[in-house]
Image (spheres, rainbow, N blue to C red):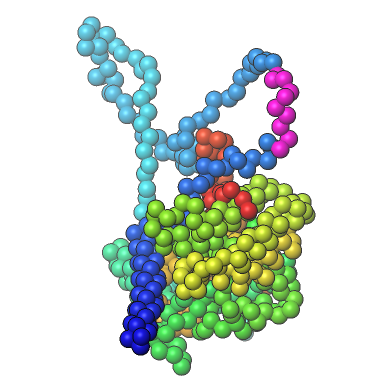
Amino acid sequence: MENNDNLRQIVAEKDARIAELEALVKYYEELFRLSKARQFGTSSEKSAIAEQLGMFDEVKDATDYKSPEPELEEIKYKRRKRAGKREADLSGLPVERVEHTIPEEDRKCPECGGEMHEMGHDIRRELKIVPAQVKVVEHNRAVYSCRGCEKNSDHVPIIKAAMPEPVIKGSLASPSAVAQIMTQKYVMHAPLYRQEQDLKRQGVTLSRQTMANWVIRCAEDWLRPLYNRLLALLLALRVLHADETVVQVLNEPGKTPTSDSYMWLYRTSGDTARHIILYEYQPSREGRHPKRFLEGFEGFLHVDGYQGYNSLPPGITRVGCWVHMRRKFTDALKAMPENQRPGSVAQEAVEKIGYLFHLENLWEGLDPEERHERRLEKSKPLAEEFFEWAGKLMALPKSALGRAVNYALEQRKWLMNVYLDGSTELSNNRIENSVRPFAVGRRNWLFCNTVNGANASAIVYSIIESAKANGLKPFEYLEFLFETMPNTTIGSLDSLLPWGDAVPERCRMPIMEVPQNAKGKRYGKHDGVCPGVLGRGA
């Protein structure tokens, strides 16, 4: 009898160990599939269930299927023939005409020998690109004196002709040179050592250290006042977005060269007509940095799930990101075997969240007050049902689905804050799109050498990205600023902002026709918030 009890105990222990190992293998399989999907799969979160768009058409609620069909009516009209895409793309460029003709003595008919006349033209169009040229500009200022005073007086007045102030006194730097260096590094992501090599091929010896000094000096002297003014305008708004990303600074006091520092970002929301994007360098990721930067701001702040934002002051309402939460369930879906995905809990969660974004797309053109009413009526009840549904799910805490459920429930109080105002958004993708230019540049220039360089980069990125967001050309705008700022007063700063009256037309991007798809919808309208992710609802 005792032997039987021992055998049962051994079998029970073995069964428990087998179950533990099976759970561990399942966990490792999830990690493997998710890692494989991240490495080799598409980064898009677009779902195959986007074809279900028709089932959410709100027009069907008002359809009367018993009413008779209208009689067909023939309508005739005329419309202007649209120019082709190539003609539209080249319409804003200057045209250089090259004539190809036959000399008069050779204009003889090969059949009868008679004189031939010009009956038409064959036109071929091609793009001609003129590479950047480097030249020296000498400013010769005339100096005048009085001949009479030179002969008859011990004091000779001297008058000098007016001449614009240089961007850096005693330097070869010009507005165009500094603007070109900044544009190449912060827009085209070309590190200074590559620019140094390119200039050397053109016969110009300009060291990367000199270029770095120009960038830092001009950022502090001329772009810093604009940055501070943009910050004041940013803090006066009601809805903002924030995020942070890693940057490496080699020579930073008290830190090793391989340690991480951070570039914090803040920007305006989608309902703002004038867009402001500001970067700020900080040596750490501590929550005191956004708290200090946003001092004086009261309103809604869109952020991700980082705990550093938990210490925001009472006047700031934190709004969570539904895309970050949805991504957890997307990862759980990717971690499953493909044959188990259809009809799974993870897919159902993705569909429920996707339907909320579908509703947001339907209300995109509404004013904030009307959008807020629609949200409270239709979207908020579905969101509350989602969290009640998620709270009843039984998932292993360490599994991908368990992590997704725990994240959703932990973030619930901030995710639901989107329903407090119609100007808020379901996602923080807007600020993540602003992080992308910095992240792409970081892959090329890799690190900042000094703290001064990191601060200067934050200022330059802020001015450039704000200019781009307001439809300006970065090089032309920077050149205009460096031509104007040394010769203007601090009281005229507002006119120099990206939307200011003093900004010349040459700085503005040409207005081009937005391509449309077959259904007449404009591409690029969605701003990257869960495109095509539509589900069956909650």
**Residue at screen point 37% across, 76% down:** 15
Residue placed most toward the observer, 87 or 121: 87
In the image, is residue 114 above or below residue 536?
A: above
In the image, is residue 79 above or below residue 133?
A: above
Residue placed most toward the observer, 174 or 510: 510
| Number of marks in the rendered image | 0
Q: Which residues are magenta?
A: 61-70
**Residue at screen point 36% across, 38% down:** 126
Q: Quadrant of the N terminus?
A: bottom left
Asked whether residue 330 is drawn in magenta, I would say: no
**Residue at screen point 57% across, 42% down:** 53
Q: Position of residue 187 (x, y in %)?
A: 46, 62
Residue placed most toward the observer, 126 or 514: 514
Q: Is residue 54 in view?
A: yes
- Tell me which corner region of the image, top left, top right, bottom left or bottom right, holds residue 419: bottom right
- Tell me which corner region of the image, top left, top right, bottom left or bottom right, holds residue 492: bottom right
Q: Is residue 183 in view?
A: no
Q: Position of residue 403 (x, y in %)?
A: 51, 71
Among all residues in the image, which is located at the extreme bottom? 254
Q: In the image, is 244 to the left or to the right of 30?
A: right
Residue placed most toward the observer, 63 or 230: 63
User: Magenta region, mostly helix, strand or loop?
Assistant: loop
Among all residues in the image, which is located at the extreme top? 112
Q: Position of residue 251 (x, y in %)?
A: 42, 87
- Tell me which corner region of the image, top left, top right, bottom left or bottom right, holds residue 477: bottom right
Q: Position of residue 431 (x, y in %)?
A: 57, 64
In the image, is residue 536 above or below residue 197?
A: above
**Residue at screen point 46% across, 63% down:** 331
Asked whether residue 68 is drawn in magenta, I would say: yes
